Amino acid sequence: MDKTLDKRQPLLIVEDDPALLKQLKWSLSDYECVLASDQEQAIAQLRRHEPAVVTLDLGLPPHPDTPEVGLAVLRELLALSPDVKVIVMTGQNDRANALKAVALGAYDFLAKPVEPEVLTLTLERAYRLFELQQENRRLAEAQGGNPLAHLMTGDPEMLRLCRMTEKVAAADASVMLLGESGTGKELFAKALHELSPRKRGRFVAINCAAIPETLLESELFGYEKGAFTGATRQTLGKIESAHKGTLFLDEIGDLPLALQPKLLRFLQERSIERLGGRDSIAVDVRVVCATHRDPKAQIAAGQFREDMYYRLAEIVLQIPPLRSRIGDAGLLAHHFVRKFAAANKRGSMSLSPGALEAIDAHGWPGNVRELESAIKRAVIMADRQQIQTADLGLADAATDAAVLNLGAIRERAEREAVVRALGRTNGNITRAAELLGVSRPTLYDLMTKAGLRGAGPDAPEPA
């Protein structure tokens, strides 16, 4: 095939020797050569052109006689573009640092002076591998389909939430996920990423409640070498690592108040400064956050900035707890039994009717996470192939089994409706009957059937 008819592939060449840079560009004329001579230029060119392959000289300014700057550039390149193939250029007697670079994620290394034929062959192999990986990813995405397709639910509210997630994913708006612990907030955050135009970028998550306040700022924003004791090298933060992708701020409600102004500035300007740094770094990310707390109550209590809430909550998705998802507890329980029975080589296991009633009746304050743990424990501890109520270890299992008999459900519903109608009308039988859509004799029959005492003579109608 005539290469002149093809769009040339971008190749980033990072080299501080002007003569060698010119020579490489001339010998690699089949590629669209993008040039950089230091760390700052290399990162800027990577972001601008997004090349599949990079050649990197380890000896870069301001310390060209040591590999430290080159290795730092390698780390930053791979953090920003994990799939990029970096070919490291080293001195003849620098095999140790070349192997260190490969250990950090470099695709290959070549010793200077590099033979043009060897370099060309290495580049062709690197581009071919990159293309194969991209094709495999496309095929996997085509086969996997919608990341929410495997969400096990029959609950109308959850199904509505899935449809909303699909719509929201295409937009670049910030999303706040609200829900109790264990409801699957991270699952929906990942779905928002995978269904978005940013799916080829990174999904970077950080739990704001799991990291000490003294370390959280450096984790989010990164730091320069020497910024504080122990900062021996430049390190990218989570925000910068998510460039061109999605940043997931889990448990945002636990973000320290002192750190909120700096995060707000990033949300407003879409740029950051590393700790110990002076340069403003532009970052292109989509922000998704989640919390089990009530952010509006936190705002009222002075624990959460209102202006930051409106930046983060352009769209709010509320994930229902498991106890309100009709039929899902049993559906998930069957799935977890199959999963853990296979993992623990227990063969074919099942749930007894009593166990299923107990699962339906339990409140599951820990939601899906609690259910999964309970089923895993039951699979391991059960003496038989059928899991019994006692194997679940639920405190209310023996006394609060769910009723599925239609007659009993109807009676309970009728009694509750009558009680509510009488309460709303302050015991006025005529008005209660109208509210229920039945005649007065029918209401009296329902009250007798339910064991409710009569309300006495009708109260006088209001004037």
Image: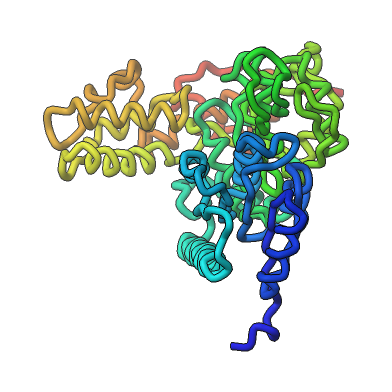
Q: Nearer the viewer, residue 57 or 103?
A: 57
Q: Quadrant of residue 264?
A: top right
Outermost residue on the bottom side: it is 1
Residue 439 in view, yes or no: no
Q: Nearer the viewer, residue 380 or 64?
A: 64
- Where residue 302 sits in the image (x, y, percent)? 81, 12
- Where residue 329 sits in the image (x, y, percent)? 40, 36
Whether 189 is drawn above or below 83: the answer is above
- Residue displayed at 85% across by 34% down: 280
Number of dots carrying numbers: 0
Q: Quadrant of residue 392?
A: top left
Q: Nearer the viewer, residue 149 or 207?
A: 207
Q: Quadrant of residue 178?
A: top right
- Where residue 156 sits in the image (x, y, percent)? 55, 47
Whether 33 is drawn above or below 200: the answer is below
Residue 280 in view, yes or no: yes
- Where residue 350 sits in the image (x, y, percent)? 21, 40
- Residue displayed at 58% across by 68% down: 116
Is the N terminus in the top left, top right, bottom left or bottom right quadrant? Answer: bottom right
Q: Nearer the viewer, residue 189 or 133?
A: 133
Give the left or right position of residue 342, taking residue 124 as reference.
Answer: left
- Residue displayed at 53% across by 41% down: 187
Is the C terminus in the top left, top right, bottom left or bottom right quadrant? Answer: top right
The coloring applied to the image is rainbow
Whether 169 is drawn above or below 247: the answer is below
- Residue displayed at 77% across by 55% down: 18
